[in-house]
Amino acid sequence: MSGGLDDLTRSLLNTNGQGNIYSPGNQSSRNIYPAIVINIDDPTEQNRIIARIINLDENEEIQGGRDRDTPDENLPFCVPMLPEHFHIRPLVGEMVFLFLENPSDNSAPRYWIGPIITSKLKLKQQNYKEAIKIFDYTIFNVNQDIKNKPKVSTVFPEHADVAVQGRNDADLILRPREAYLVSGKFKPGTNDVNTESPSYLQLKQFENVKTGPLQTFSQANLQSTNINIFSPVGKFRDKGLASFEINEDLKSFGDFAGTLHPTVFGDELIKVLDLIIKALILHIHTPQSPLTPIPETIELQTYTVSGKLQNLISKHVRIN
């Protein structure tokens, strides 16, 4: 009999927005609540927000809650619990946790931490109604499963990693003896891995290497469509030197890339120097007569500005 009475009481509480089942929101002794963000504009720029403690009914509709009788303009500011060293802002409509300094006084100071994002694929924004499902007592996964997508899962942090994940596809992942900074993991607007124009910096330490002369070494890998390495006091390119480079891709990289010099491929340069040295040593040159052709001098004739000299420089890595 008591079970039926409990069910009736619980139903009445939920109907009046005072329940504590789906999105608990009304116990006077409680001091931690999930809340929906309604304003993030702090006129003092102290990272304070305004969030409302609400309750959801069985249909996931807002039904009262602790702040049900308080208009938006009378809700107190919530003070951040993270220092500004970590610049994180929730968005309007997202969920945060509120800590009440004095649960018996609804106007007492409040503190917030969040936003609460439950899905790796919802970092850009996840609304309260989705985030609150973190309290659901279910064995079923409410988020999209990425474990069965090998290409996608490799660009997300593993359980043992420490990571800072941006709102929109820019992450810093710290793995054992490795730092990985990446931008643009996915193709825009999709969950497909970006293989056309990925950009990342990887710093990694290797120990106990089984092959090669080095048993321990470090490695830095930088990948991007265009890489500019420059010093503000370095030697920028004179306009006249632009005529020695044929590079249609340069038009896409902006004006600044055009002020930098293309890097030289060391092995291609050595190849040309080897041809020049062999030509000087092996050629037969009768005074007042043209150079007697040999294979090295014949090949050297192909190295012109409009020809194979362009093979010596990079189209995408630039320096000053």
Image (cartoon, helix red, strand yellow):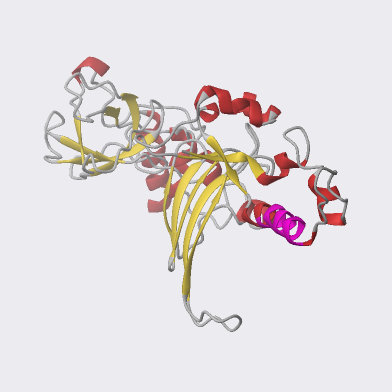
Q: Quadrant of residue 76?
A: top left
Q: Quadrant of residue 38?
A: top left
In the displayed structure image, the side of residue 172 where residue 155 appears, left or right = right
Q: Position of residue 22 (x, y in %)?
A: 42, 41
User: Would you say residue 149 is visible in this rendering?
Assistant: no
In the displayed structure image, the side of residue 5 where residue 244 appears, left or right = right
Taking depth in this image into account, of 270 and 202 the one nearest to the observer is 270
Residue lying farthest front?
Answer: 287
User: Which residues lie in the magenta part?
Assistant: 270-281
Give the residue at x 63% y 31%. Answer: 189
Taking depth in this image into account, of 168 and 8 the one nearest to the observer is 168
Q: Position of residue 219 (x, y in %)?
A: 50, 64
Give the residue at x 53% y 48%. Answer: 200
Taking depth in this image into account, of 25 and 296 the one nearest to the observer is 296
Give the residue at x 66% y 52%. Answer: 269
Give the residue at x 47% y 73%. Answer: 217
Number of numbered discs present? 0
